[in-house]
Amino acid sequence: MSDEHTTPQGSRPSHRTAAIIPAAGRGVRLGPGAPKALRALGGLPMLVHAVRAMARARAVALVVVVAPPDGVSEVRRMLDEHPLPDGGTEVLVVPGGETRQQSVRHGLDALPVGVDAVLVHDAARPLVPVDTVEAVISALRDGAPAVVPAVPLADTVKEVEPAVGRAWEQVLGTPDRSRLRAVQTPQGFDRAVLAEAHERVACEGEGATDDAGMVERLGRPVVLVPGHEEAFKVTRPLDLVLAEAVLARRRAHDGY
Ligand code: C5P
């Protein structure tokens, strides 16, 4: 990060880099209960972990949380109950939309003038290490318009014809695993590039599941930096067990 993004006193930089956390999904795959972002992990709501993970990066001076439209005041209250350990990062809460893509758009609309780099981070990846966040910011500052943390795949992947009304799915092909990566968040963007993608790229159905994919459709380059196994997405009940284990290990080893 260059000096122009820090103040002479070494305090938090002004709002040049902001993080948007879409947290408006219901998380139905986790099973019944509270919206996913509000589920407890190590005694704290998952969303609080995600906000802290972003705020831990020194360049991030603003975090915009996108809450379920009917849950803005609940999320605001919950975040106020768990303030950031170092109060230097501002946290805004705005209402989300029907799809993740719309929720990110609402977050983008809430960014103040002066923000030139944006991270988009899923609330569902509460344990991303700060080094991964910093690696994304650093590649952005080095001039990449879009940056994605990614990891190689453990499993072989099959492309299939989805079975509609049939017992079996038919395999169409097996992509070369060495050329595939699983992508994580935070994904980092030059603000203007991400705004252009949200303006110009229309996505059908559920909308985009990944902001970088929209930037690719603009024909702009997207680069990868190494992701981290602890940046996994909490999607199914077993992921909660793994997340608790990661937190317990951090507490034992780092007093985290
Ligand atoms: O459903 P999925 O796990 O892919 O959602 C990824 C992220 O997008 C989650 O953090 C979820 O809360 C968020 N999301 C959202 N608005 C929606 C749907 C999902 O902010 N309408």
Image: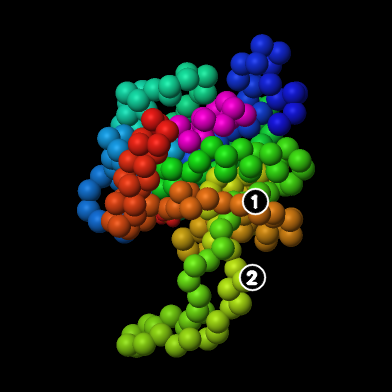
Tag 1: amino acid: Val
The residue that disc 1 covers is 225
Q: Residue furthest left?
A: 32
Left or right, 10 with reference to 100: right
Quadrant placement of the C terminus:
top left
Seen in the picture, residue 225 relative to 217 is either above or below; the reply is above
Seen in the picture, residue 240 relative to 250 is either above or below; the reply is below
Residue 222 position, x and y percent, is: 69, 55
**Residue at image location 35% in from the left, 36% down from the top:** 252
Under tag 2, what secondary structure? helix
| Mark sitting earlier along the chain (1/2) | 2
The magenta segment: 52-69
**Residue at image location 51% in from the left, 57% down from the top:** 209
Residue 167 position, x and y percent, is: 32, 88
Quadrant assignment, res 94: top left
Res 179 label:
2
Look at the image and tell me whether residue 93 can be seen.
yes
Quadrant placement of the N terminus:
top right
Residue 200 position, x and y percent, is: 66, 54
Tag 2: amino acid: Arg
Residue neighbourhood size for the residue with mark 2, other residues' Cα within 10 Å, grouped as few (<14), some (14–19), many (≥20):
few
Q: Which residue lies furthest to the front in this view?
A: 253
